[in-house]
Image: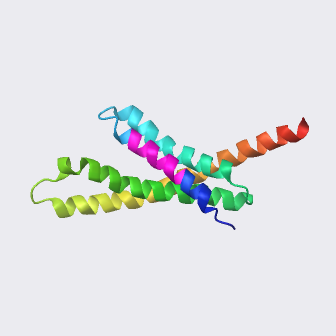
Amino acid sequence: MILNWKTIATGFIVTLILYIAGASLGHISILKGIIYILAPIIGGFVAVYMNNTNYVGSIINGGIASGIAGFTATFIISWLIGPNLAFEGYLEIIIVIIVINAIMALLIGALLGLIGGILGLLAKRHVFENENLT
């Protein structure tokens, strides 16, 4: 398995930008939820579609990119909306909730990134098969 850090970084950046764009929507909860679900899938797709290594390695690259982006986005979004969450006397509880949320974002982001990686692999295989036929 070969980790391609260029594709992991690209998938990471794509996923992170989509997460932050979703967070900036304000109180539009349905659209925000859709973006939060699609962000790691799109990031994993981009990471795998760019990758030229073997199939298993490219799917894992998508999962790593999306998982780390979900983990990082949790802290960035919490920092952006942090002043609204800083209730007097509840700071320790809020920090624990943010850390638990970051761990869950890492796991769910990696899983959705793997799904996006599989979709990217199928799309890449389809494109290259069509190029070979013509």
Residue segment shown in magenta: 11-21
Q: Is residue 86 magenta?
A: no
**In the image, is 104 to the left or to the right of 118?**
left
Residue sitting at x 49%, y 53%: 109
Q: Is residue 124 visible?
A: yes
**In the image, is 76 to the left or to the right of 18?**
left
The residue sitting at the left extreme is 88
Residue sitting at x 40%, y 61%: 103
Q: Is 91 placed above or below 41 here?
A: below
Q: Position of residue 69 (x, y in %)?
A: 46, 55
For the stretch drawn in magenta, the main secondary structure is: helix
**In the image, is 5 to the left or to the right of 52?**
left
Q: Quadrant of the N terminus?
A: bottom right
State the count of labels: 0
Which of 77/87 is in front? 77
Q: Position of residue 29 (x, y in %)?
A: 35, 34
Q: Is residue 16 magenta?
A: yes
